Image (cartoon, rainbow, N blue to C red):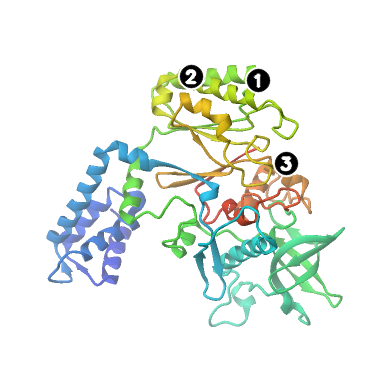
Amino acid sequence: MGAGTRKKVQRKFKIRGYTLKIDALEEILSFLSRFEDAEDEAIDLLIDEIERESLKSSILDKEPVQRVVNLLLEAEAAAEENPSSSSRSALRVIDAFIVPKFCYDPIKKVFYEHTGKLPIHGDASAKAALYRDRFQLLLQRISRDRHFSRPAFDTEMTETGSCEISPIQSLIGKTGRKWIMGVISQLEDGHFYLEDLTASVEVNLSNAKITTGLFVENTVIVAEGVMFPDGIFQVNTCGFPPLEDREDSLALLVGLDFFGSGVLTMEETIRLAGLEKKAVNDMFVILSDIWLDNEETMTKLATVLDGYENVEVVPSLFVLMGNFCSRPCNLSFHSFSSLRQQFGKLGEMIGAHQRLKENSQFLFVPGPDDAAGPSTVLPRCALPKYLTEELQKHIPSAIFSSNPCRIKFYTQEIVFFRQDLLYRMRRACLIPPSTEETSDPFEHLVATITHQSHLCPLPLTVQPIIWNYDHCLRLYPTPHTVLTVS
């Protein structure tokens, strides 16, 4: 272990009131060598366990440290000897409709969990809350960014290079360079406005330099410019709120389960991190547009399954995403009984591959044109039981989830989303995307959804969203992986 780790251990123990002898420090370093990817968590866990011991002195020698280390290693060994337990905790699918909702209190500057019922048909206040919650989520994030916060002992912002966000309401009668943040909209053809929680202002973007991203209505942007006497804010540069490191977000949200997978103890996190490091053979296979009514598609799917049936280690998970029919399942669709039979044939096909049936899990995510609810509103429900029960007779362990859906794989957080997102975002753009940094449309899409911390920041007129379940589409804290299929 390096000198940096040695100093870190001594510092953390000193903060908790402990002094380490040389032999105790060496024992701790030996323990940490097992958890190189979760070093900080392992140190914190070790100190927590030592604090539960009955110690005669705050000066630690090897004996109490070794006792605690042995207990932790025994617990890890017991978990590894019970593979069924570890496999159950390794992969968890979270339906969008069970993701907890957290709201931000700007007065107390904390998040709190919404505990009431969330009806599908929300009232008018739910629509207003949708925009307010999106804005406050990004506002609290940017308030911690060192470039957008006022220094405690320096009133001249330009000297430090920081850029304090001004409420739009405060622009009246003000001159000079200002930074504002708001939701962009086009209230009149060719006239853009920015709106925050205090007011709205017309902005002139004709000469603005923009950053990477797709600027559509309802996205939150940060703009720098000057307020003119005619009440129009002349924008010089604008872009999306800066990203925040996942670890920084998690440090603020200790004990809050934004992802929906449950809060893990420190011991469980370290155990899963160790198992994840060893799971080098785990593999996911993601397929979309599985048209069950198309013979060519089903033939090629059989070829794919045959190939994976004969590999040395079969995939841990198959994610089969819609659409599951070549025609939209709308009001003009009258072949639901036929689609039900086709799902049964898919179950037979999978069941004929014995290794895959026994060792792999199958997750089904509906597409935008599948029969997963009365409309195309997001989030979309799982495929109805009427369609899938024939398949489940052959594959009882098959999982049917919403669109989008989330997966917790050991410590990794993964989001799956099946939507024609890039096409819709490009069509809804208010400003042509900048080509200064990249001309790749996909990179613009990635920048948009990550900086907005939202999977689908489109206007509700373009993509309807259930008002009370907009939080299911949030990407905060930023997950490890987001997989969108168009």
Q: How many marks?
A: 3
Real-space CA distance between mark 2 and mark 1, rounded to the nearest whole angstrom: 20 Å
**Camera sees residue 241:** no
**Secondary element type, mark 1:** loop
Q: Which residue is at 55% across, 67% downward?
A: 104
**218 above or below 35?**
below
Mark found first going from the N terminus, 2 or 3: 2
Point out residue 418 in the picture as x, y percentages from the top left corner. 62, 39
Task: Name the foreground residue: 62 vs 400.
Answer: 400
Residue 136: image location, x then y, percent: 61, 66
Identify which amino acid the numbered label 1 is placed on.
Asn
The three-letter code of the residue at mark 3 reads Tyr
| Few, some or many residues within 10 Å of mark 3 (<14, 14–19, 20+) | few
The structure residue drawn at horizontal position 52% and vertical position 25%, both measured from the top left corner, is: 390
Q: Which tag, 2 or 1, sits closer to the chain's start?
A: 1
Mark 2 or mark 1: which is in front?
Answer: 1
Q: Is residue 106 above or below residue 353?
A: below
Residue 307 numbered mark, or none:
2
Q: Which residue is mark 3?
A: 423
Q: Which quarter of the picture shows residue 228?
A: bottom right
On the image, which quarter does residue 409 sit in?
A: top left
Q: Is residue 116 left or right of residue 84?
A: right
Look at mark 1 in the image and give the residue it sits on: 294
- Above or below residue 418? Residue 267 is below
What kind of element bears circle 3?
Answer: helix
For badge 2, the amino acid type reads Gly
